Amino acid sequence: MITKRLDISPENYGDSIREAARILKNEGIVAIPTETVYGLAASALSEKAIKSVFTAKGRPQDNPLIVHISDIDMLYDVAEDIPEKAIECAKRFWPGPFTMVLKRKEGIDKSVSAGLDTVAVRMPDNTVARDIIIESGLPLAAPSANSSGSPSPTAASHVLYDLDQKIDAVIMGENCKVGVESTVITLVTEKPRLLRPGAVTVDQLKEILPDIEIDRAVLTEPEDKEKVSSPGMKYKHYAPKTNTYLIVSEREKFVNFVNFKKNSGAVCFDEEIGDIEIPAISYGNSSDEKTLAKNVFSALRKADELGVNTLYIHAPSKTGVGLAVYNRLIRAAAFKVMEL
Ligand code: TXA
Ligand code: MG
């Protein structure tokens, strides 16, 4: 299959949005930019299109997708028994990097939710994404547009690296400004629960949901992989091809540790890269969690090109969006975390 590159510079914008919508209405699949990561979009009403998404990504069948909408009214086409708190959250955090799991409405294809009776919903803060939803008139199921297991794509080039010739089209948009996937909470459990941390932080969530619980899978390896509440959290994920360790330590210890390593590379912070003597890539200043989030996945992709056998990543703090970065990195390291 030839993957169409859809250009969205001003002179081609309208044509490209219409072409993306046409493909989606015909049950094709299109990679679209969002503020978090690129998504691989398909009609949430089409079993055939959803199947193509799972096939293109090589995604495990039991891992459900997020449905994307363009305004709050559309929420009622996707979910039912919507609690008052969900509306409050929607008004506060949408459009934005925030996803709610609610009861699935009939019409949304079961395969979107991998057979569960719930559905995850989000309104992205990206005009291109929302214009495509509006133009197609469809709720769009969209997982991250990477091959399953590899780092999430924050640039159109990442999408093409993983999925060229496996999908109908890709929007050649800008790099994603947030860089890590949305915060996912569930509102179908007795107490609201954080399933995946993102740029909407725990402190922000507590303003509306003071009793929110944090799922164990956010910071630790799931023990019983059959029972995790967010199936996506149980897989090795976001991982470079290189054997990877996450290192929790202060600056000096990290630098001394990696400088003794042979055939190895480091993913580190701006303020220490000058002292590191092995091949290294910085993902930002350690005190600037937003920049770390924005750069983390592209740093993991670049790390695979260092030509080393082992990779040591310096762990960020777990505050603010740092929690989301840390959550992705323990998975990138397949839970091989070392404290120095
Ligand atoms: O920022 C994002 O959320 C991006 C962009 C494209 O919107 N999408 C994304 O999708 O990250 P994906 O498929 O890579 O991750 C979806 C996560 C998975 O961890 C999945 O298990 C969880 O959401 N999820 C989806 N539906 C669910 C459901 N019904 N119940 C529990 N977890 C669900
Ligand atoms: Mg993903």
Image: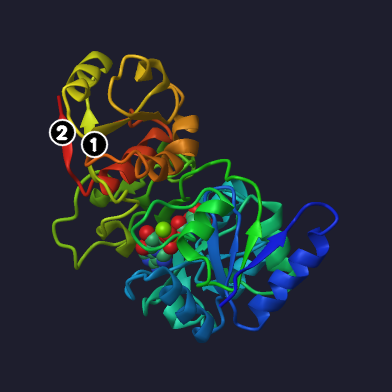
Measured from the top left, where is residue 144 in percent x and y? 47, 59
Measured from the top left, where is residue 254 in percent x and y? 23, 21
Residue 129, placed above or below residue 245: below
Mark pair 2, 1: CA separation = 6 Å
Q: How is the image coloured?
A: rainbow
Which residue is depicted at the point 30% across and 57% down? 233
Q: Which residue is mark 1?
A: 246
Residue 306, placed above or below residue 122: above
Disc 1 residue: CB within 8 Å of ligand 2: no
Disc 2 residue: CB within 8 Å of ligand 2: no
Which residue is depicted at the point 56% across and 81% down? 45
Residue type at the position of mark 2: Met
Which residue is depicted at the point 41% across and 63% down? 147
Residue 132 figure quarter: bottom right
Q: Earlier in the sequence, mark 2 or mark 1?
A: 1
Residue type at the position of mark 1: Leu
In front here: 264 or 170?
Answer: 264
Q: Which residue is mark 2?
A: 338
Which corner quadrant holds the N terminus? bottom right
Instruction: Answer with left or right where residue 184 lies relative to residue 309.
Output: right
Decide: few, some or many residues near mark 2? Use Cα within 10 Å; few <14, some 14-19, many ≥20.
few
Residue 224, placed above or below residue 268: below
Element assignment for label 2: strand
Which residue is depicted at the point 59% across and 79% down? 28
